Structure formats: structure tokens, C-alpha cells
Image (tube, rainbow, N blue to C red):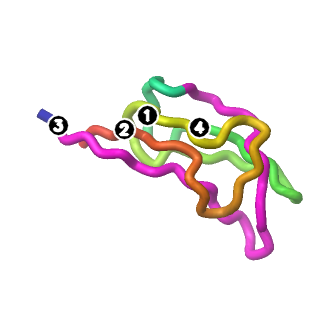
Amino acid sequence: MAERRLVPVTVPRWGLTMEDGVVQEWMVGEGEEVREREVLVTIETDKAVGEVESPASGRVARILALEGTAVRPGELLAEIEATE
């Protein structure tokens, strides 16, 4: 049987001056299957809108930052239940 583990999805730091961003849109919902590198969510910063990709294939176990929420680099957005 494959081992399951939770993989964190965090806000990347896009540039040295990035202080925060706002979650714009989730492309997936809790419980949905995702593939590694699939776009999960878009985040708007003061300079651009960036895409956050899944760090692993698996299932979205939890979404912690809802659309419209302000987030900071390194903050936990979601967890992927990955299968290895």
C-alpha cells in the first residue's frame, strides 16, 4: 500500500520586495485530485498576478486561505495529500 503524506502549499516570494498578496481564485476545491505542477490558485501582488502550482500529485486535503484573503510569503495556503 502506498504511503500518504501531507505536502504543504505555501505562498511563494515573487521578488525581494514582496510583502503580501491576495488570493484571487482557486482552480481546485477540497477533495479534488491534482497533478504535480497543476495550477492550484492565483495570487495578486502589488505588481502582478502569479500562479501557485501543486508541489505534488494527490488530493487537495485542506484549503486554508479563501479567495479575497491577504497572505504573506511562506504562509500556508493548502495541503495536498500525496501518494508516493
Label ID, residue 61? 1
Say which residue appears at 71% left-offset and 42% top-offset. Answer: 42
Three-letter amino acid code at the position of disc 3: Ala
Label ID, residue 2? 3
Q: Position of residue 14 (x, y in %)?
A: 71, 64
Number of residues whose C-alpha sits closer than 10 Å to that of mark 1, classed few (under 14), some (14–19) or many (20 or more) = some
Q: CA distance from mark 3 to mark 4?
A: 24 Å
Element at badge 1?
strand
Residue contact at pointers 4 and 1, CB within 8 angstroms: no
Q: Is residue 63 left or right of residue 80?
A: right
For label 4, the residue is 40
Name which of mark 2 and mark 1 comes first in the sequence: 1
Say which residue appears at 82% left-offset and 55% top-offset. Answer: 45
For label 2, the residue is 81
Name which of mark 3 and mark 4 comes first in the sequence: 3
Name which of mark 3 and mark 2 comes first in the sequence: 3
What are the residue bounds of the magenta stretch? Answer: 3-29
